[in-house]
Amino acid sequence: MNTLYKFDMNNSNDEYHNILDLPDEILFIIFKKLNTIDVFYSFGDVNRRFNRLALDFLYIRHLDMTTFRSIKSEYDRISSIDAQILSEICVKLVPRIHHQVHKLTVQQDSIQQILQAANYPQLYSLSLVNFQQEILYQYLKGIVFYSFELTK
Amino acid sequence: MIFRELLTKQITHLYIDIIKPEDYWSKTILNIYELIISLCKKLTVLNFCDMFITRKCLTAVFFLSSTSNICSTLIKLKIKVENLMDCLSLLDGRLESLSTLICSASQIFEPIIDIDEGVSQILMIIFTQNTVNQTNFVFLENTSQIEMFFINCIY
């Protein structure tokens, strides 16, 4: 890994540190700048410590499944989460954190997998972002979800 | 977790963002609104299509069926509507628990109907108008709630 920080400019040993030398508190501050997907995908499998830190950090109340691209897409465009990342999140992450999630933000392309991955017993706040009217209407009528359930 | 079940039994706060349909006025949007307020039995806070300032997705609530089941638990509603008639039709008394209503209306014209006894809880109507003819109305239940002024001019 590249050397990222030099903490002590006056250190006569000219010793450099890399990101792994940062304390947990500083890493948490960095994580806070990122969303769920980025934290999980960027730090989840780096090493054991980062895996623990990422999951500790993701001891979160708000599971936000929007991406940076979807923020731009509020100008009436649709963007999607990579299918493989979404699948990994549903299999590895959601079952471990779903019981503590109070708020959930999902897009049209992720809602079905995210909701079917767990029960979310404490969920009370739901944000549906970037939906097409016909799709949302079908979901509300139960058509899409029920037919999917029946085929499982 | 099935979506409808979640909405019916669990969700108290719901925020909806819909991509603007091609037509200026969409019956489907109204249907979605109607389904939500009848389906979500525990709903207290609803933001309907007013999450992002750039979205122009209007709900013609004036045309909502008078026989629709309406969620009586709703306390706060934020919604983007077409005109003042839509705002007033939200105050027909069916939203029994409503204390805060924030409407972004795209047009203003004189209301034909009077505000009657059914909306007597409304003490203040505040509106601002800006260059793009976008108006926000704030309805407050009583003077003690006046600390919550939402006058969001859209430029």
Image: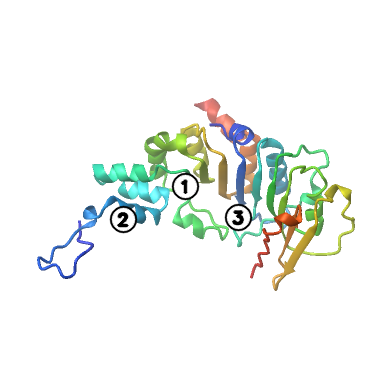
**For residue A151, above or below residue B66:** above
Q: Residue at x 73, y 42 (%)?
A: B34
Going from the N terminus, do you reach mark 2 or mark 1 first? 2
Can residue A133 be spotted in the picture?
yes
Q: Residue furthest bottom?
A: B131
Q: Chain of mark 1?
A: A
**For residue A62, above or below residue B4:** below
Q: Residue at x 36, y 49 (%)?
A: A39
In terms of depth relative to the viewer, which is nearer, A120 or B75? B75
Callout 3 touching callout 2 (CB < 8 Å): no
In terms of depth relative to the viewer, which is nearer, A29 or B17? A29
When asked about the image quadrant of residue A10, the answer is bottom left
Q: Secondary structure at mark 3?
A: loop
Check chain identity for marks 1 and 3: say if they share one: no
Q: Does residue B7 appear to the left or right of B145 in the view shown? A: left
Q: Residue at x 20, y 59 (%)?
A: A2
Tell me if mark 2 has few (under 14), some (14-19) or many (20+) residues whose alpha carbon lies within 10 angstroms of its own: few
How far apart are the alpha carbons under marks 2 and 1? 24 Å
Check chain identity for marks 2 and 1: say if they share one: yes
Q: Position of residue A125 (x, y in %)?
A: 56, 43
Q: Which numbered disc covers residue A26?
A: 2
The residue beneath circle 1 is: A65
The three-letter code of the residue at mark 1 reads Met
**For residue A89, above or below residue A130:** above
Q: Chain of mark 3?
A: B
How far apart are the alpha carbons under marks 1 and 3? 16 Å
The residue beneath circle 3 is: B51
Q: Does residue B13 appear to the left or right of B125 in the view shown? A: left
